[in-house]
Amino acid sequence: MKKLIFFILFSSLITSIALARSTGCKEGNCENGYGKWVYTDKTTYEGEWVATKKHGQGTETWPNGYIYKGEFKESQWSGIGILFFPDGSTYEGEWANGFMNGEGTFTWSDGKQKKGIWKNGSLQE
Amino acid sequence: MEVSKNRFKTLSEPVKQFGGLVGIIILIFLTFFVLNNIFGEGDELVAKMKIEEERIAEERKLNKLISSLPSGVLVSFDGTDNFKLSDELYEAVCKATKLIPQRAIMGANFLNFRAHEIYTINGNKIDETFVKWDDEKNKCFAGFVVSGNNVGVDETVKVSGEALSFLSTGIDTRVYFIKNF
């Protein structure tokens, strides 16, 4: 029984160490400067950091295929950027507070496009 | 009556015993018939058991399928390096999938700001998720329901779209991309 408890505790420790080593700031400077951060769900951000926040130009890649390349402000997608959806659709244009806000073009994977002013992810007709 | 009694007395012992045996059997059948009518569900129970057996068989078939899939992202569309599902596999994976991870929900919320707001206010809580195969459209649909109080107003928002990619972990499959645009 003691051996089993020891084995479980030891396994948990090894797993925690392995997880801790595979997440966090993996390259560069993730406080002020340029660095790459890996999240526990394998989302990665590589780009500029200011006061430990994503700020400036960067690329955020989600494990399920969403990729945002562009400007960040206070860790949010804000400014000019392009979002690639997993199926190949894209939105290129202005962002604010993590949403499509401002002028932009949505292009479906089949080439169909919608261009205009967007507000919180919706095209204003 | 007296004549009948006399006739019974004149019967031989084996005939009497056989008659008794038949009587007991009839009595047992009648008892079970009455009990079954009072407490039993009869055909309904048999039908339920058949449905349950079919469900277990289907689940076993799906589990076998999941364990045979490669681990990683499975997609139903062209243009990626990920494992491309055949039409048959796409349907089977859809029917076997129950989970929708956070990133898939966050991705769908890009096109639904109200859902995003409620989701964020409620600490990423989801009321309900669903993954359904649509026989008419021959497509897999997935979605979720969020509800909560948003600026003093109780709101419920349902987000749904086509489930176009999945994650196979080797143990289960999860919806990885909901196309709601």
Image: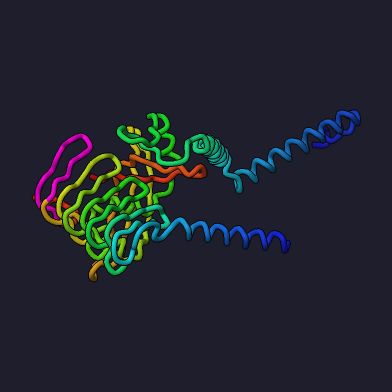
According to the image, what is the colour scheme of the structure?
rainbow
The reply to whether residue B51 is visible in this rendering is no
Q: Which residue is found at the position 81% from the left and 34% from the top?
A: B21
Is A120 part of what is drawn in magenta?
Answer: no
Q: Is B93 on the left or on the right of B38, as rendered?
A: left
In percent of width and height, residue B140 lies at 35, 38
Quadrant in which residue A45 is drawn: bottom left
The correct choice, above or below, for A46 with respect to A108 in the image is below
The reply to whether residue B130 is visible in this rendering is yes
The correct choice, above or below, for A97 with respect to B52 in the image is below
Depth order, front residue of A88/A20:
A20
Depth order, front residue of A89/A53:
A53
In percent of width and height, residue B179 lies at 28, 43
The correct choice, above or below, for A104 with respect to A1 in the image is above
> In the rendered view of the protein, which quadrant contains the N terminus of chain B?
top right
Task: Find the magenta span and give its range.
Answer: A104-119
Q: Which residue is found at the position 41% from the left and 29% from the top?
A: B88
The correct choice, above or below, for B180 with respect to B153 in the image is above
Q: How many marks?
A: 0
In percent of width and height, residue B65 lies at 50, 34
Q: Is B163 on the left or on the right of A3, as rendered?
A: left
In percent of width and height, residue A39 lies at 39, 57
Depth order, front residue of B88/B166:
B166
> In the rendered view of the protein, which quadrant contains the C terminus of chain B?
top left
